[in-house]
Amino acid sequence: MKKNISEILFEAMQRHKDGQYDQSLALYKTVLDMEPENTDALHFLGIVYCELNNYDVGIKLITKAIELFPDYYLYHINLGHIFYKQKKYKNAIHHFQKSLELEKKNADTHYHIANCYVKLQNYPLAIEHYDIAIQINPLMYKAHLDLGLVLQEIGQLENACKHYHEASLINPEASEPYFNIGLIINKTYRFLSSISYYKAAIKRNPFSFEANKAIACAYADIAEVEEAMIHYRTAIQIKPDNRQAQNAYLATLNFHPDLSPEFIASEYRRLSEKDNQKTYESLRLNYNRSERIRIGYLSPDFRLHPMAFYVETLIKHYNREKFNVICYNDTQTPDKITDYFSKLPEQWYNTANMCDEEVIKLIKNNKIDILIDLAGRSLNNRLTVFKQKPAPIQMTYVGFKNTTGLKAIDFKITDKWADPHGKTEHLHSEKLLRISCCHVCYSPPKWIGNTVSQLPKQQNKYVTFGALTNFERINKTVLGLWRNILHNIPYAHLIIQSKPFNEESFKEIIYKFFLDNNIKRERIKLVPFASMKEHLDLYKEIDIALDTFPDNGSCTTCHALWMGVPVICLEGKTYAGRVGVSILSNLGHEEWIAKTYNEYLQIAINLSKDTQQLMDIRKNLRNELMLTIGNSKCFMSSLESAYLSVISSGIWGRSDPAN
């Protein structure tokens, strides 16, 4: 028996639903052969063509259906979805609005309009339509969730959390609301609270890459390195090729007090294997002695960042007769420091919005002789550029306290104090290019105008120790040694400044750590991180600074010295644990370097007893610093000699020309 139009149309829709496109196309066309103006067949045939990526034909068919039957809201909605998929958001809004004229109180349609306005970055109208959708359907989970995202984007964090909370009540098994609340709390440095929300997200979705990565980062921020490692490894298992997770995991290993340097190095090698398998075209160095050597510095941190205090010398005080310096500014959040730096070298390129291929092409066009990475494995690095070897000689310098793991990078710039001969070569994929002086040159923040104060002990009548640093460096072994110092110097006080002290519950954990060993609360001052000026001013309350281990402070140490405060450090086995050794040795104060915990304690006791010595140190230390670690002329002479030795040797990547 011959089928009627309704039966054929029903079968076509079923085939369409089952993904049998060829059969559904044929059946819809059969309907149109029988009834050319059947709007349902035109509409659904148009959808099939669009699903097969033939948008031109599909849109024409749906548009014809609308012309024939303009008062059916569903045609407008589906055409709106098609335009949304094509990123034609204004067209999509037009059809969603048309559907609302026909069916006024449709929460879903308001939600779709809001999504279009988000794509157009018209956040006020997006919020208006999300709100209407929620008024119509208060239990609309996705509207609460996406409204939260918009509010979060524009900085209305309290309102964002309110809608995430509503979303979690509507759908208790969803992980996203908990994760998003965790992100907001984390930005205020309340890491314990953020961890509780990340845990809730992971409980609901154990395989959430983002939640595992985020909780790992939060654990690292409070020096819970073991927990951080567990979650970073989970994140890497979920997304094995994600570089952010790999880099963060490798960076966290530097802070673990019990891991061997050899194990850490093996992890860098393991996670670099894929990059090191890549073949690249070897560029020949066409150096003409009559021409200047072209040095390229690539960094995401040409801004107010610890790197800024080391970078200025590189791009300001170089020998312009022998070198041409070109900077590739990958900074995503430029500031006044970025603007200042941009005026120092002869060429400056903003590359943050360029893809790797564009940056590589630019470097090759600039005919760079030596390309230098200033980020290592730190956040927003461009090792993906370096692995493709766009310059004949590639180096890494100071932006990260370990190897990059990349064989495409020939040298790491260092010195004999940070990387003693025969001690750390096996921990690096790069050859070690040791310069003759300290490998860092400190440019102090003179624009802030911080002056050296009177020794606090003179007024307080007790000595004050201090550590103003990232808490990820302050593991329980470090805290234990500091506690022993206070135990052995009964009236001594300790100031610690770090981001986690924004959270009262975390401060209480640290207070309890000391109180359990009879160190009273009033002897401990825990300060959240503030502005650069306030950070430096806090040194005016400190007599002696205490360095961390196994990851030493670097710029942190220089800031303390600039403010006239001596620094006690513990000598380690790796570059990360020997930066302090390099700085203090070149400063001429090897007596502040300890080889054991007991020596560290004894140096603290001895320094605390001699008020006159501390007064003399405070008076002279800034000048000593600028004559040594801040001596740009001496530093650049040593660094540029190393560059020349590499160029003249012609054997980069296979030896240590500068020794």
Image (cartoon, helix red, strand yellow):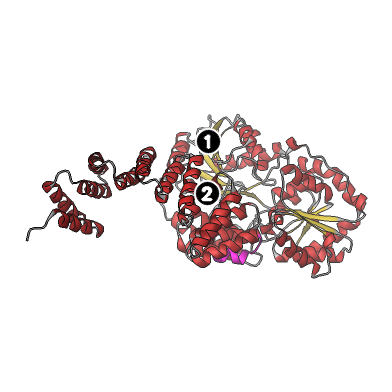
Q: Above or below — where is 112 with respect to 486?
A: above
Tell me, yes or no, whether the highlighted magenta stretch contains residue 224: yes
Q: Which amino acid, mark 1?
A: Asn
In the picture of the structure, the residue carrying the numbered disc 2 is 410
Check the image and report above or below for 368 versus 422: above
Prevailing secondary structure of the magenta residues: helix
Check whether the beta carbons of the residues at disc 1 and disc 2 lie within 8 A of each other.
Answer: no
Residue 71: image x %, image y %?
A: 29, 42
Q: Secondary structure at mark 1?
A: strand
Q: Is residue 184 left or right of residue 20?
A: right
Q: Nearer the viewer, residue 575 or 229?
A: 229
In this rendering, position of residue 589 left or right of residue 148 = right
Q: Which residue is mark 1?
A: 350
Residue interval drawn in magenta: 222-230
Q: Can the viewer see residue 648?
A: no
Q: Is residue 482 visible?
A: yes
Residue toward you, 76 or 194: 76
**Mark 2: secondary structure:** loop
Q: CA distance from mark 1 to mark 2?
A: 25 Å
Residue 608 horizontal/vertical position (percent)? 88, 57
Q: Amino acid at mark 2?
A: Asp
Residue at horizontal 82%, vertical 53%?
Answer: 544
Residue at the limit of the structure toward the bottom, as seen here:
516
